[in-house]
Image (cartoon, rainbow, N blue to C red):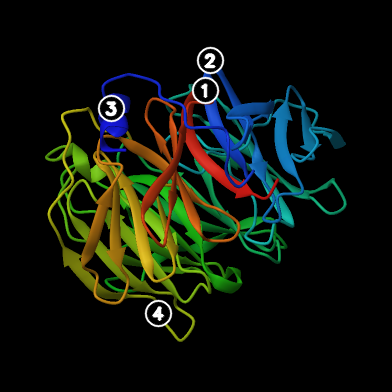
């Protein structure tokens, strides 16, 4: 197996025997200029079908995409169109991650926001957003704003729409748009830990908290340390939780932070194998979320250039499993000690858990996939579905 991993890292393309659990892997990929959602069979090692890349509902019964002036609802299990809604203009799904995965849904999937802009691409002069009830598949509100605003979040009630108001090329405010009043509230969403109003940084990814009350977003900054932006979806306030590290302009490895929630949603983990840092975050159920613990460990290094993924960490059976530039790093969630490193010849950009929680799938920057048994940490399968350049492994389901 060690020889196989070395060969894979050097550019060979080994294929394991076509056995395994028969899981379906939903992977966002890019082929040329086209982004797709490839449905990959772990037994046949190939894509059953490709769909247009969109934002999935939490139960994965729907994938919403924008096509020309329409919103299309597709069943990802069959590829069939469920419904279509005319938007009467070229609206787009807002990006949810730094590498371009679409977003726009409330945590429960009931509400969807699409957006379009007027004026120069770098600095739009007007912003237009539609709030869509996905259950009824109808537009329930339109927001028209002067200036450059971007979607941040919408709560499960569809009443609080959080926006990023761009002030200049570097700073921005988080604003609350009251859907019922059809207006921005007067107060800026402030960091309750220090009272700051303006923010700087690049959002890498986000995770909704248990019950849909919080949105945790991973931010990095050019010349300052990384942080988690914990946004309350119940009111106009947030907390900025500082993480160990430096600016990505000083250390490009800072771009490889990931977030992962444990199974019951009680704890959030932030981890970066490339810098050798991790943190445990309380979920805010009993007050303000906060950093409970941090740790440092030997950083995983590689001669390959860093590639940011959108979903490179998972939690299973008391272990935080994080992909990075030199394979998978296994961290015990109780002690925060590194207990193993596997698939060390691979540059991992995305990971996903099997439905039974017994295996983790790791996707390399070149698109190869390794299946690793969690109990033994043994690689049980390796294959290349040749689906395209990977963006993220968005879901693993039973066949």
Check whether the beta carbons of the residues at disc 1 and disc 2 lie within 8 A of each other.
yes
Could you say whether the residue bearing mark 1 is in a helix, strand or loop?
A: strand
Could you say whether the residue bearing mark 4 is in a helix, strand or loop?
A: loop
- How many angstroms separate mark 3 from mark 4 (CA)? 44 Å
Earlier residue among tags 3 and 4: 3
Earlier residue among tags 3 and 1: 3
Residue 349 at x, y percent in the picture: 38, 38
Q: Nearer the viewer, mark 1 or mark 2?
A: 1
Q: Which residue is mark 1?
A: 30
Based on the displayed image, in which of its 4 quarters is residue 154 positioned? bottom right
Could you say whether the residue bearing mark 3 is in a helix, strand or loop?
A: helix
Q: Which mark is residue 288?
A: 4
Check whether the beta carbons of the residues at disc 3 and disc 4 lie within 8 A of each other.
no
Q: Which residue is mark 3?
A: 9
Q: Which residue is mark 2?
A: 33
Residue 200 visible at all: no
Q: Nearer the viewer, mark 3 or mark 4?
A: 3
Q: Is 319 displayed left or right of 296 in the figure?
A: right
Q: Nearer the viewer, residue 178 or 314?
A: 314
């Amino acid at each position: 197996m060690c020889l196989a991993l070395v060969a894979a890292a050097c550019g060979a393309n080994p294929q394991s025997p076509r056995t395994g659990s028969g899981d379906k892997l939903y992977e966002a990929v890019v082929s040329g200029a086209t982004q797709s959602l490839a449905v990959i069979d772990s037994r046949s090692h190939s894509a059953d079908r490709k769909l247009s890349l969109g934002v999935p509902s939490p139960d994965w019964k729907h994938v919403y995409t924008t096509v020309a002036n329409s919103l299309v609802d597709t069943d990802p299990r069959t590829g069939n169109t469920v419904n279509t809604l005319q938007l009467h203009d070229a609206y787009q799904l807002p990006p949810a991650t730094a590498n371009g995965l679409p977003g726009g849904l409330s945590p429960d999937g009931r509400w969807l926001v699409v957006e379009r802009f007027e004026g120069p691409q770098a600095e739009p002069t007007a912003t237009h957003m539609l709030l869509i009830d996905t259950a009824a598949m109808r537009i329930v509100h339109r927001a028209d704003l002067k200036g450059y605003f971007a979607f941040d979040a919408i709560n499960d009630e569809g009443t609080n729409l959080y926006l990023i108001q761009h002030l200049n090329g570097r700073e921005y405010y988080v604003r609350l748009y009251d859907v019922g009043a059809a207006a921005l509230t007067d107060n800026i969403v402030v960091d309750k830990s220090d009272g700051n109003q303006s923010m700087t940084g690049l959002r890498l990814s986000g995770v909704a908290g248990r019950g849909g009350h919080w949105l945790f977003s991973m931010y990095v900054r050019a010349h300052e340390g990384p942080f988690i932006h914990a946004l309350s979806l119940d009111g106009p306030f947030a907390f900025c939780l500082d993480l160990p590290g430096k600016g990505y302009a000083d250390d490009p490895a800072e771009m490889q932070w990931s977030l992962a929630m444990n199974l019951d949603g009680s704890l959030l983990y932030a981890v970066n194998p490339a810098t050798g840092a991790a943190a445990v975050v309380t979920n805010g159920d009993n007050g303000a979320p906060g950093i409970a613990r941090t740790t440092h460990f030997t950083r995983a290094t590689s001669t390959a250039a860093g590639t940011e993924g959108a979903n490179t960490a998972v939690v299973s059976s008391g272990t935080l499993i994080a992909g990075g530039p030199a394979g998978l790093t296994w961290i015990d969630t109780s002690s925060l000690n590194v207990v193993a490193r596997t698939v060390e010849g691979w540059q991992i950009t995305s990971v996903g858990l099997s439905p039974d929680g017994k295996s983790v799938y790791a996707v390399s920057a070149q698109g190869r996939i390794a299946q690793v048994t969690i109990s033994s940490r043994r690689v049980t399968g390796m294959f290349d579905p040749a689906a395209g350049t990977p963006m993220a492994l968005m879901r693993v389901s039973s066949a």
